[in-house]
Amino acid sequence: MSQDEGFFKKFHETINSSLDDVTRNNFANLESNAKRVSYLCSLPIVRNYNVIDDLQKCQTGGEFPVKKDLEKARQLKDEGNKAVQKGDWAKAMQLYSQSMVHMPEKETEELSIVLANRSAALNHLEQYEDTLADIKRCLSLGYPRHLRYKVYERRARCLLVLKRNKEAVSAFQDTISSLDEATKLDKEKRQKMRTDSKLMLEILNKGLVLAGNPKDPEPLKKTPPKPKLPGKNNPQYPAASEAIQIDYEEVRGRYATATKDIEAGEILLVEKPHSGVLLAEYSSTHCQNCFIKCPIPLPCPKCPNVVFCSDKCLETAQKSYHGFECHILPLIWKSGCSITCHIALRMITQRKKEYFTSIIQDIDTKVSGPYKTDDYRNIYHLVAHEDKRSKLDFLHRTQMTAFFVKLLEVSGYFDGKPRTKPVEVDELKTLAVDDKYKEDVALFGGLILKNLQILKFNAHEVFELQCPKPKVDKNIIKHEGKSTFLAGAVFPTLALFNHSCDPGVVRYFCGNNIVTRGRQS
Ligand SMILES: [Zn+2]
Ligand SMILES: [Zn+2]
């Protein structure tokens, strides 16, 4: 746990220096994670702890409270418009994206205008698919009717380039009908656009092929292709190849062996993380959900903290962890907690409270049937070496947990309703959690503390490779370019491989998927 920076360091020191021997002894004698968290959270020194001062002094993680800011959004939009006048479309695209980051969700019309402007920039940058995506978003937000002819026409032209002629026909028809509402467009221009669109419709309806080939520009967005397992999936461990067998022995623990000869470069495992967290410093450049770089970011509509690569990633995150983390994220960053600690919390926020209450009864029984990556119980049973932990180590992690439990309360998690407003400083006057959540503190605090112990041995660093396609040579796989530490994650099937310490494999990442290949046959 790194506590060099962030306000958690002081919290930790204060608690440590004020606990007397009796309290320490009481804590040391506790035998379950739930009891450890409940006990620490009940101590007056923890309950009455005021985070505000530390929070305001702390530089880590940027300003607090952090909110969407209409003025800032407008300023960035204006700068974007200036870049357009200079013909600098790349700069304009970036400024409009920044404007979207700060635009409050309720300003739908203004947001739709920024999206329309960004679609124009993307069109000039020949990013046609992304142009179409922004136009779709802008129309769904109620782009003003008198301006719609612009985006319909842009859509039609994009579709033409992409040779989606059928859709282009209806987009030109939309252009023509929307011109009736273009009240601010002067008569001559309106007439010209109508004539042009009609001409295009005629050509398209006659099925004439337009001269010239569509341009094929380098896409700004690069989604690495997800590798596939060569044969069938392993019936017991679906993320692994059927060429792998995982066994268990009392002395060795779990270990993986090959059931057949493995070719050099053969893919043995493709697994997405059970849980993963992007480092704070990449939160505005990389997708919060799949970790790929986002040159055309889609910001969270509710907070200025994170961006996504697509509507799909945004929706996935919003429906799970980001729904609850949206407004507490700056606090997690400012605490200075390590990425591993954050994963321990995300393992909770990504599933609803009901999920955990339904599995907790039988949590100590191992799951039968296929070993699934998204099943929390599989993570729960990974090695944690709980018996080898020192009392001080427990105390340390329990303090972090006490803070996370408070954050869960603030996030709305215990009520199953994600909060909609940014956190105000006053809400952290004390770390006391309302007594009505006593059971939640024990359950979720206990699980977070357990997660912290498991992750110590099972978390992986996720790297971004500048060259996503590795070259498979005769015996080795070459990666060219440098790799950057981007995120932390836990891969349940890989964790089983890992403990067999097999040097005969190489690993790399495609987005947030980990891929393992054989190194030697
Ligand atoms: Zn993504
Ligand atoms: Zn958010």
Image (spheres, helix red, strand yellow):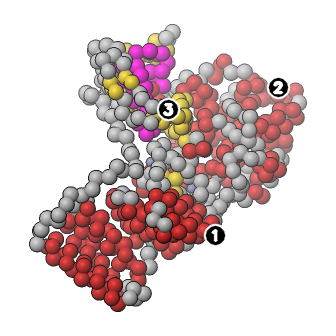
Secondary structure, mark 3, is strand
Q: Amino acid at mark 3?
A: Ser
Viewer can see residue 521: yes
User: Residue 71 shows which numbered tag?
Assistant: 1
Q: Is mark 3 within 8 Å of ligand 1?
A: no
**Residue 97, image x and y in percent?**
51, 60
Q: Residues within 10 Å of mark 3 (few under 14, many from 20)?
A: some
Depth check: give the residue in front, 94 or 85: 85
Depth check: give the residue in front, 355 or 53: 53
Q: Which residue is mark 3?
A: 483
Res 519 → quadrant = top left
**Residue 37, image x and y in percent?**
71, 36
**Residue 409, image x and y in percent?**
67, 51
Secondary structure, mark 2, is helix
Q: CA distance from mark 2 to mark 1?
A: 55 Å
Query: In which quadrant is the C terminus drawn?
Result: top left
Q: Amino acid at mark 2?
A: Asn
Viewer can see residue 348: no
> Is tag 2's residue or tag 3's residue first in the polypeptide sequence?
2
Q: Is mark 2 within 8 Å of ligand 2?
A: no
Secondary structure, mark 1, is helix
Q: Residue at x 55, y 50 (%)?
A: 284
Q: Are marks 2 and 1 in contact (CB under 8 Å)?
A: no
> Is tag 2's residue or tag 1's residue first in the polypeptide sequence?
2
Q: Residue furthest top?
A: 251
Residue extent of the magenta highlight: 495-518
Q: Is residue 203 above or below residue 279?
A: below
Q: Is residue 300 magenta?
A: no
Q: Residue at x 75, y 30 (%)?
A: 395
Q: Is residue 180 above or below residue 503?
A: below
Q: Is residue 500 magenta?
A: yes
